Image (cartoon, coloured by chain):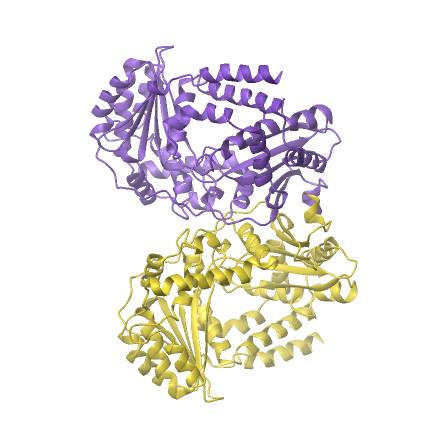
Chain colours: A yellow, B purple
Amino acid sequence: MVALQFLMTSAMAADESPLREAEVANFMLGNGMEVVVIPDHRAPIVTQMIWYKVGNADEPPGKSGIAHFLEHLMFKGTKKHPSGEFSAKIAEIGGEENAFTGSDYTAYHQTVTPESLRTIMEFEADRMRHLVLTDAVIVPERDVILEERRWRVENSPEQLLEEEMQATLYQNHPYRIPTIGWMHEMEQLNREDALKFYDRYYAPNNAILVVAGDVDAGRVRRLADETFGTLPRGPDLPARVRPQEPEQNTKRIVALTDPRVTVPSFQKSWVTTSYGTAEQGEAEALDILSEILGGGTRSRIYQELVVKQAIASSGGAYFNGRSLDPSSFTVFGSPRGEAKIEEVEDAIDAEIRKIIEFGITDVELEKAKNRFVRSIIFARDSQSGMAGIYGAALATGDTAHDVEAWPLRIRAVKAAEVQAAARKYLSPDRSVAGYLLPRESATSGDKSR
Amino acid sequence: MVALQFLMTSAMAADESPLREAEVANFMLGNGMEVVVIPDHRAPIVTQMIWYKVGNADEPPGKSGIAHFLEHLMFKGTKKHPSGEFSAKIAEIGGEENAFTGSDYTAYHQTVTPESLRTIMEFEADRMRHLVLTDAVIVPERDVILEERRWRVENSPEQLLEEEMQATLYQNHPYRIPTIGWMHEMEQLNREDALKFYDRYYAPNNAILVVAGDVDAGRVRRLADETFGTLPRGPDLPARVRPQEPEQNTKRIVALTDPRVTVPSFQKSWVTTSYGTAEQGEAEALDILSEILGGGTRSRIYQELVVKQAIASSGGAYFNGRSLDPSSFTVFGSPRGEAKIEEVEDAIDAEIRKIIEFGITDVELEKAKNRFVRSIIFARDSQSGMAGIYGAALATGDTAHDVEAWPLRIRAVKAAEVQAAARKYLSPDRSVAGYLLPRESATSGDKSR
């Protein structure tokens, strides 16, 4: 059985990089803008994604939300293309577009037919340096982001808890600050803040252009030179050094009791290493650990709590190692029926202890690798998924080569490394547990009132 | 009884400002340095205190500990007065000296005989702008502060818990950062950091000179003009705007389990207003609340937990409202004998609830005011205490007039205001509880493992 498993693995490994490295082109324009081209000729569409190496962890102290605010303002028009024209153009040619802000990056993307690529590149290049940022634009848009925070966060006990868990989990690193911003700071964001942030970070030498789809590198290079390539460099930015986490010594609990909560839920997080900071293989081991412990219905937590003990309606684990600085590992679960939230927590803790003490089997390691590598491949199936993987990696300090090698690096994880990662990072003495509780519930979070 | 109490109060009030406002001189030198002179002719000594309006809450992100490091470096000598000369001089004339760093200020003080005042003013003025900051000075002194952190913090479970409680209590404000610094950031502090901080903040227009003692304002003004007055202004500094706290929605727990702990202890803190930020009367009400709830052996917590129920070996409350931005209110207790830490917590919570629900009596209000005002007066009894009260107030945005009026403002607090302050600030849903636990103890902090 094990032998067969290994055989399958080797067979899969050869195919797991769906694109040969040589096919992915990676070059630099004269003004310092990095370009990645991922040819994919399955369908006559093309995705442009532009990644700025700035996110909410790069915001000046007291200006939380400015990165996300800029994301909104980027749709407000330039002198050449007034507000709404870019989006109208994309709609007209039957394309799609979106944007998002993270702790480490801000990204904008459009999917269109290949003949429209030049048009969207010209639009995207234009708004990189020529945004019109007047109070007439800024003041009403600030109301929009405040309203967004109201419905996304203030109206959601889950999100309120999530915010304060992050603020508790990270004691020093700006990852503790919510991406959307703290309400009282968002209210004060103004034209000067937006201009400063835009002028500093929105420049070709702080951006990565990823083009995936029915196009070749030569055409992209030519178009990029004609559009983005004409923009002047921005200021040379210092290395992205943020305040780092101190050693953590305590176990922390964050509890939110709210009448809007109907089903209690539990989660527990730890600060961990990431692909940006890890010793060789550690982030890969954490990826496999999250898969074995709580990745979907085959995982230990799901099988034990939901299927076998039937004390939880949900349960799992997740790890997103794609960050410039530390990352975090989270387990979670919700009690079912008469079960108490403490039973769910105890059962999850027991699963973690089992891995720390007894490790994992080779069989489950191989199955987890198969599932995990498949998920990477599935994510690469769509153009925007593919462009997203490259963009996120490059914006957090990895290389295109690292992206290509990821499946192989996952394949190289050993059972002992997974156990070691659990032991090193999932210490009960350094965890932050969160409880979302209905008003009046008598649970562990409430006991210490 | 109540009538008599009021009579006593009025009689005391007239005497409670031990120094008439007119006697305290407050003026500005030509280079923007503020000077306060507090004549006190009871003994032939004089105290010089210099307060810089910079503390660890003003440090650049990632440079925690630089304010305290500078405090150390200020003893390292100038071109004119090499390392050790200032201290040797003070010892030679039989004086005393010290220095301290807080979140909002850094202060240096010496007590000497009046004839030596000019000498210490000259030394202090000299090191304000002419410190020698070479690597030969900086590198070994960094080892000193690292060692200081090792014995003060790393060797002390109490301090480790305290640090992580602060980091949890303040989600956004730099008050969450320890004054001594995070170890990993202290290790990186270098000459450039020290020079930048020194050049920016150590300047006459960012300092307050307080001279208390056997001296008159005229002489201090003359000496100040001749010493500090010859220094050039430093850069004009922007207003001290730090990131402020968001609304808090959760109840948090921080637990440290450590084999070095022999007796468990409990504390609970809340973010509150301060004298720097409060609505009229709120900080005064919190001062009285802390006095009634937990100020010494007459307090409710002490009487109920230590004396009556005999479940605690200690218990109390404290509030230090003297800060530029928010402050915090803390209650604490340690179990005695067979009592569990939860019993102590429950009993303290019950005392808080009683005040929130039923308020306080006029008699205990008057007694608390008497005790509190007496403590202000006692603190003013020593020259350094007096200078310290003025310096801390002026460095956090209050005026000399506010300091004079403090006892009267405490006298004006009404019972309903104390109850309102408890209700507004001491909400169980927004508290941060800390547990210091011996290894293997089974307590509430451990229950959610």
Asked if residue B99 shows in the view, the reply is no
Q: Which image quadrant for residue B76?
A: top left
Q: Is residue B303 above or below residue B443?
A: above
Residue A113, position in %: x, y?
A: 43, 87
> Viewer-proximal residue, B355 or B241?
B355
In the image, taking residue B154 as reference, residue B44 lies left or right, namely left
> How many numbered markers are drawn?
0
In which quadrant of the rendered image does the N terminus of chain A lie? bottom right
Given residues B21 and B220, the one toward you in this image is B21
Residue at 55 percent across and 38 percent down: it is: B162
- Residue A330 left/right relative to A138: right
- Which residue is at the front of the view, B297 or B133? B297
**Quarter of the picture holding the C terminus of chain A:** top right
Residue at image coords 34%, 38% = B138
On the image, the x and y values in percent for residue B97 come to: 38, 22
For residue B119, side relative to residue A370 (left or right) = left
Residue displayed at 37% across by 18% down: B20
Q: With respect to residue B273, does B248 lie above or below?
A: below
Image position, residue A21 (x, y; %): 45, 79
Question: Which quadrant of the structure image shows residue A186?
Answer: bottom left
Tell me, yes or no, if residue B48 can be seen here.
Answer: yes
Residue B397 drawn above or below residue A190: above
**Which quadrant of the view contains residue A236?**
bottom left
Is B228 located above or below residue A11 in the figure?
A: above
Residue in the picture at 25% in, 18% down: B218
B328 horizontally vs B190: left or right? right
